[in-house]
Image (spheres, rainbow, N blue to C red):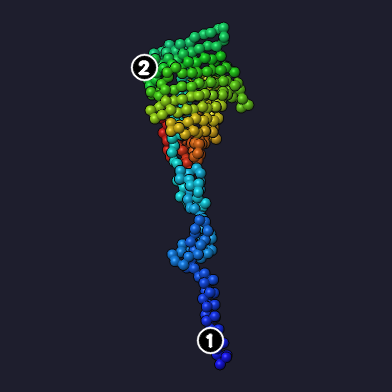
Amino acid sequence: MKKLLYLLLLTPIIYFSSCSKSNSNEDYAGYNCVDGSCVGVFTNPQYLSLNSCDSLCGVIFGCTDPLANNFNPLATVDDSSCIYSLSTQACQDHLTAENIFNDVGHIIEVGLQDNGQSKACPNYNLMNSDISNIDTLIIDFGSTNCLHNGKLRRGRINITYTGKYRDAYSVITSTFDNYYVNDNLVQGERVVTNQGINSNGNMWFTIDINNASIATANGIINWNSNRVREWVNGENTYTFTDDVYKITGSASGNAVNGHAFSMQITNPLEVDFACLPSCLIKSGEAILSPSGYYDRIINYGNLICDCNVDVTINGSTFPIVIEN
């Protein structure tokens, strides 16, 4: 009897002990991520296992590339959603400035070779200054547009020079006075220095474009350039059509959209004056780096006289025609 009574008294204890053990096991249905920590829940879990929750809790999916348009600074895991700017605006504006100043260079060299002969458009006015040994040439296109080399021009190019283009160490400095090309106002300074003969036996020059600006209908292009120009063919004749140069160097500026950029020539540009009146650069490669964006690779083509270039951005290639 005592034994039976003892068993009856013990049974509730065992029962309640089992209930308590079940609660301590915390048999959750799964886990939710709350403020970066995994919390067990009995209903509607985000994750079925604690391992899954631990590996994903606090993870923020998104674009982690700071150069992408949709960069998410809070993202911890890249989800391949990055979107990149494929704009070629900086390339187009750089190429426009480059083409305009190549054109200016040709006009100046023709003017110096013509020895100041007067023409209707432009008019060349040569002024000598024997005291300072610096001469001045004014190339005047007039106050209204006139057609020259296939482009409408007006205004003046003012040139001072210490010697002829072919004279070693001569310096030719050009500035602009209300000079317009196809109604685009061109300003700045162009300085050409004849550096003599290089180790290849070729005459070479430095060409510096300082504080240039081109006011277009879409905005203002700001441009600076420092280049080395090696005369590789045509030096021994006095005709321009056989002149070929190799160009190296760099440039920088701001596009019409206000974005800054820099440019470095990675494969020498070939400038061929036989290409006139088309664009002069017919081969070579450069890398243009817009601030905050991926590099653009500019390919000038393969020895064909045209104004077509290819711009490659992040593996995608876009054809561009330089306005000439």
Q: Along the line of sight, which residue is nearer the eye, 72 or 219?
A: 72
Which residue bears the numbered disc 2? 144
Identify the residue shown where x is 43% and y is 28%. 220
Identify the residue shown where x is 55% and y is 30%. 249
Q: Along the line of sight, which residue is nearer the eye, 90 or 51?
A: 51
Q: Is residue 164 above or below residue 287?
A: above
Secondary element under disc 2, as helix, strand or loop, is loop
Identify the residue shown where x is 55% and y is 90%. 4
Q: Which mark is residue 185?
A: none
Q: Along the line of sight, which residue is nearer the eye, 268 or 273?
A: 268
Which residue bears the numbered disc 1? 8
What kind of residue is marked 1?
Answer: Leu
What kind of residue is marked 2?
Answer: Thr
Rendering coords of residue 219 (x, y %)? 41, 29
Report whether 147 appears left or right of 116. Answer: left
Q: Quadrant of the C terminus?
A: top left
Rendering coords of residue 180 (x, y %)? 41, 21
Rendering coords of residue 302 (x, y %)? 48, 35
Please tell me which of labels 1 and 2 falls first in the chain: 1
Looking at this view, name the residue that lies furthest to the right: 199
